[in-house]
Amino acid sequence: MFILGNPSNIQGMQVDIQDLRTHLLE
């Protein structure tokens, strides 16, 4: 899940957001 404010996880968060966006579009 998201760990806000943790710079090391920003790239992972971006991938998760894209994944969620894809699921919403389906």
Image (cartoon, rainbow, N blue to C red):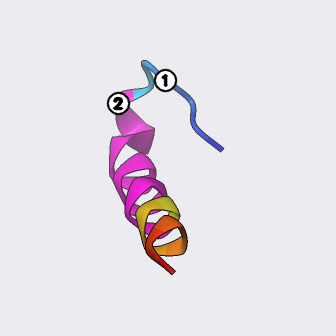
Callout 2: few (<14), some (14-19), or many (20+) C-alpha neighbours within 10 Å?
A: few
The residue depicted at 42 percent of the width and 54 percent of the height is 17
Neighbor class of circle 1 (other Cα within 10 Å; few <14, some 14-19, many 20+) is few
Q: Are marks 1 and 2 in contact (CB under 8 Å)?
A: no
* Residue 15 image offset from top left, x and y in percent: 40, 62
User: Foreground residue, 16 or 23?
Assistant: 23
* Range drawn in magenta: 7-19
User: What residue did someone put label 1 on?
Assistant: 4
Asked if residue 18 is positioned above or below residue 9 in the image, the reply reads: below
Judging by the rendered image, the residue that carries numbered circle 2 is 7
Q: Give the quarter of the image for residue 5.
A: top left
Coordinates of residue 20 in the picture (x, y in percent): 51, 61
Marks 1 and 2, how far apart at CA: 8 Å
Left or right? Give the position of 23 relative to 7.
right
Q: Amino acid at mark 1?
A: Leu
Could you tell me which quadrant the N terminus lies in?
top right
Question: Callout 2, which amino acid?
Answer: Pro
- Residue at (43, 47) in percent of width and height: 13
Kind of element beneath mark 1: loop
